[in-house]
Each structure stands twice: as structure tokens, then as C-alpha cells.
Image (cartoon, helix red, strand yellow):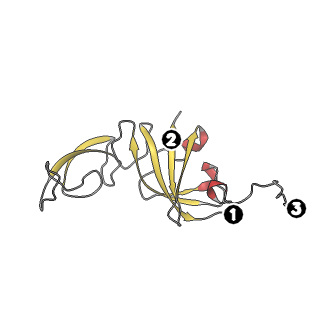
């Protein structure tokens, strides 16, 4: 049974976290970075999300274009590389070997980053009142 921590970025620049287990987590299994996910399976009816990345159980970031679960790559720029040498200064043309994860969500993934593409009727973070809740008027 898979278990993920979702980090959801909204259009207004805020992010929200949600832990998913069981059937909700299975909706994400075997999808890749760049795939679209319906919010129905994740408990957000009316929403649509885009998978933007994540990390595995050891903290290595997911990188688009890497086919395997975990691999060492020689990189010039991109995810998992800041472009700085040992002294902390930037250096043009610097190549480094970095360990990254593949672009597919598997059972070793712990965190999955999502971006909201289409918003649903219910807002994140309790901004809107829950269904059936009555608003109290102050006298």
C-alpha cells in the first residue's frame, strides 16, 4: 500500500499539504512528471492537477527524463544542481555528478508536488465554509 505526502501549489502562490493513503495514493501510482491528475481520486472534486515533481524516501528529487528509480547523472543545470563549486561561488561550465530519481511515481516516493490547473468549488485551507455548516451572526 502506497502512502504519499502531497504538496499542492495554488494559483495565488500558496501551498497546502495533504497525506494520502490507500485508494487515493493508488490514483497517482505509475504516473509521470507532466501528467494531469483528476482531483476526484484525491479527495478534491472539481479540481485538476499537474504533477511537477517530488522526492523519494531518501530525499533525492525526481527529474524529468530519467527512466529508472534512482540514478547518478552528470549534470550542468536543472533539478538537483545549484551550479556552484566547493567554495560556494558560481562557475561557468561546471559539471557535477548528482543522484536523482526517475520521473515515474512509484512505491519508494514519499512526496509528490502538484500544481492546480483547474479549481473546484471548495477552496483549500478552510477559506470557504464547509457544506452544511451554518454561519453564526454576531449581535
Near mark 1 (Cα within 10 A), the count class, few <14, some 14-19 or many ≥20, is few
Near mark 2 (Cα within 10 A), the count class, few <14, some 14-19 or many ≥20, is many
Whether label 3 touches label 1, CB < 8 Å: no
When the figure is inspected, residue 61 is found, relative to residue 35, above or below; the finding is: above
* Mark 2, residue position: 4
Q: Circle 3 sits in a helix, a strand or a loop, which is it?
A: loop
Near mark 3 (Cα within 10 A), the count class, few <14, some 14-19 or many ≥20, is few
Q: Nearer the viewer, residue 111 or 25?
A: 111
The residue under the point 64% across, 50% down is 43
The residue under the point 41% across, 55% down is 33
Q: Nearer the viewer, residue 25 or 67?
A: 25
On residue 61, which mark appears? none
Q: In this view, does 53 lie to the left or right of 40?
A: left
Picture coordinates of residue 89 (x, y %)? 15, 56
Quarter of the image where one finds residue 58: top left
* Quadrant of the rendering where the C terminus is positioned: bottom right
Q: Which of marks 2 and 1 is nearer the N terminus?
A: 2
Picture coordinates of residue 62 (x, y %)? 35, 48
Q: Earlier in the sequence, mark 3 or mark 2?
A: 2
On residue 121, which mark appears? 1
The residue under the point 12% across, 62% down is 92
Per the model, the C-alpha gap separating discs 3 and 1 is 30 Å
Picture coordinates of residue 130 (x, y %)? 75, 54
* Mark 3, residue position: 139
Amino acid at each position: 500500500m502506497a502512502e504519499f505526502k502531497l504538496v499542492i501549489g495554488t494559483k495565488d502562490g500558496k501551498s497546502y499539504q495533504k497525506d494520502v493513503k490507500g485508494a487515493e495514493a493508488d490514483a497517482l501510482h505509475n504516473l509521470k512528471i507532466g501528467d494531469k491528475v483528476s482531483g476526484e481520486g484525491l479527495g478534491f472534486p472539481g479540481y485538476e492537477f499537474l504533477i511537477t515533481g517530488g522526492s523519494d524516501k531518501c530525499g533525492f528529487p525526481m527529474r524529468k527524463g530519467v527512466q529508472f528509480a534512482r540514478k547518478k547523472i552528470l549534470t550542468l543545470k536543472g533539478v538537483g544542481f545549484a551550479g556552484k563549486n566547493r567554495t560556494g561561488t558560481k562557475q561557468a561550465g561546471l559539471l557535477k555528478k548528482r543522484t536523482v530519481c526517475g520521473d515515474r511515481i512509484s512505491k519508494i516516493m514519499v512526496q509528490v508536488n502538484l500544481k492546480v490547473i483547474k479549481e473546484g468549488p471548495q477552496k483549500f485551507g478552510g477559506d470557504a465554509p464547509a457544506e452544511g455548516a451554518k454561519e453564526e451572526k454576531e449581535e
